[in-house]
Amino acid sequence: MKACRVCKRIVEEGNECAVCGSKDLTRNWKGIVIIWDVNSEIAKKLGIEAPGKYALNVY
């Protein structure tokens, strides 16, 4: 699995982020959060606008 350096979305297949379209992916990330409701406090604090799996730290 890789994480997008732009929006932190976890990318399980391919070489492009499904959310922002970036090809700047890395295998060097830590922590994971799964967002179902983009109106939740966590999603708002992290600036997440689409449901999915996101890395907490991307290096």
Image (cartoon, rainbow, N blue to C red):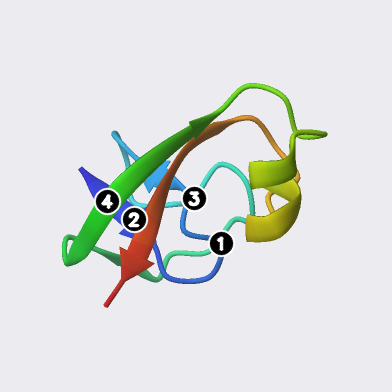
Q: For the residue marked with disc 2, what is the amino acid?
A: Ala
Could you tell me which secondary element the residue under label 3 belongs to? loop
Mark 1 or 3: the one toward you:
1
* Total tally of numbered discs in the picture: 4
Residue highlighted by disc 2: 3
Q: For the residue marked with disc 1, what is the amino acid?
A: Cys
Q: Residue at x 82, y 34 (%)?
A: 39
Mark 4 or 2: the one toward you:
4
Q: Are marks 3 and 4 in contact (CB under 8 Å)?
A: no
Residue highlighted by disc 1: 7
- Quadrant of the image occupied by residue 53: top left
Q: Locate the C terminus by quadrant.
A: bottom left
Counting residues from the start of the chain, the first of labels 3 and 2 encountered is 2
Camera-nearest residue between 8 and 42: 42
Q: For the residue marked with disc 3, what is the amino acid?
A: Cys
Could you tell me which secondary element the residue under label 1 belongs to? loop
Q: Residue at x 64, y 30 (%)?
A: 51
Q: Residue at x 29, y 34 (%)?
A: 13
Residue highlighted by disc 4: 31
Residue highlighted by disc 3: 17
Q: For the residue marked with disc 4, what is the amino acid?
A: Gly
Measure how far apart labels 3 and 4 are at the Cα level: 18 Å
Q: Residue at x 33, y 69 (%)?
A: 58
Image height of 22 relative to 40, above or below: below
- x then y, percent, for residue 10: 38, 44
